[in-house]
Image (spheres, rainbow, N blue to C red):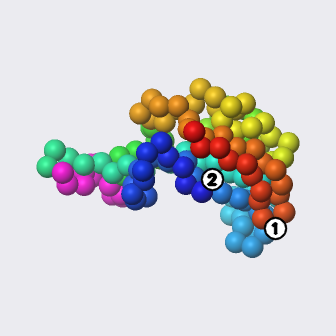
Amino acid sequence: MLISNHAVTSIYDEYFLIDYYTPDGLNENQNMFRYGISSSRGIRVYHVNAKISFDSSGNVSVGESEYYSTGFKYNNSNANNKFVSLLKANSIDEKDILNSSLSGLYLYTTLSLQFGSSVYQNYQYFDGSSLNFKFNVLGLGDKAKISLEVM
């Protein structure tokens, strides 16, 4: 699921991406490549800030010192505006997913607090607006079952 505080017309925007992680299928061999990946099931919440950087002429701006040009305005080297962060379940913590391993602490389960009102209640979009959604995990099996409220 992709949730934002405004109409999203492309992937080049700010939004929250919610997915269901299972340790099988496509994810089955992740421990071979990155240590600490959970063998549990759960809901992951990513905060994505994939805005494009434009120069004064309206062209995609790529700095001359950049080794690999992406055109994105942010990357994960900026402490305040990360390109993508994984939000930890049950406590306020953003994990820089490009530079560290992931664990079950980042999976929302039926035992987790409600995302939005119990956890991350003061968390904001980069424009300063409050989170506009919350969810509870109701069940995890072949499919995830959650209750989601968009405000």
- For residue 133, which numbered disc appears in the image? none
Depth order, front residue of 140/56: 140
Depth order, front residue of 35/124: 124
**Dot 2: what SS?**
strand
> Is 22 on the left-hand or right-hand side of 97?
right
Depth order, front residue of 119/64: 119
Query: Bounds of the magenta span?
Result: 58-71
In this rendering, the answer to whether 20 lies above or below 77 is: below
Residue 65, how many percent across, how many down?
28, 48
- Per the image, the residue denoted by label 2 is 18
Crowding at dot 1, Cα within 10 Å, few <14 / some 14-19 / many 20+, comes out as: few
Residue 31 in sight here: no
Please identify the dominant SS of the magenta region.
loop
Residue 134, how many percent across, how many down?
66, 40
Residue 88, how many percent across, how many down?
69, 40
Answer whether residue 61 is magenta in the image. yes
Answer whether residue 56 is magenta in the image. no
Residue 58 in sight here: yes
Rendered residue at 27%/52% (across/down): 62
- Per the image, the residue denoted by label 1 is 142
Which quadrant: the N terminus?
bottom right
Rendered residue at 75%/73% (across/down): 25
> Is 145 on the left-hand or right-hand side of 97?
right
In this rendering, the answer to whether 78 lies above or below 70 is: above
Q: Quadrant of residue 29?
A: bottom right
Asked if labels 1 and 2 touch by Cβ distance under 8 angstroms, the answer is: no
- Count how many numbered circles sit on residues in the image: 2
Residue positioned most to the left? 57
Amino acid type, mark 2 = Ile
Rendered residue at 59%/43% (across/down): 150
Residue 77, how many percent across, how many down?
46, 41
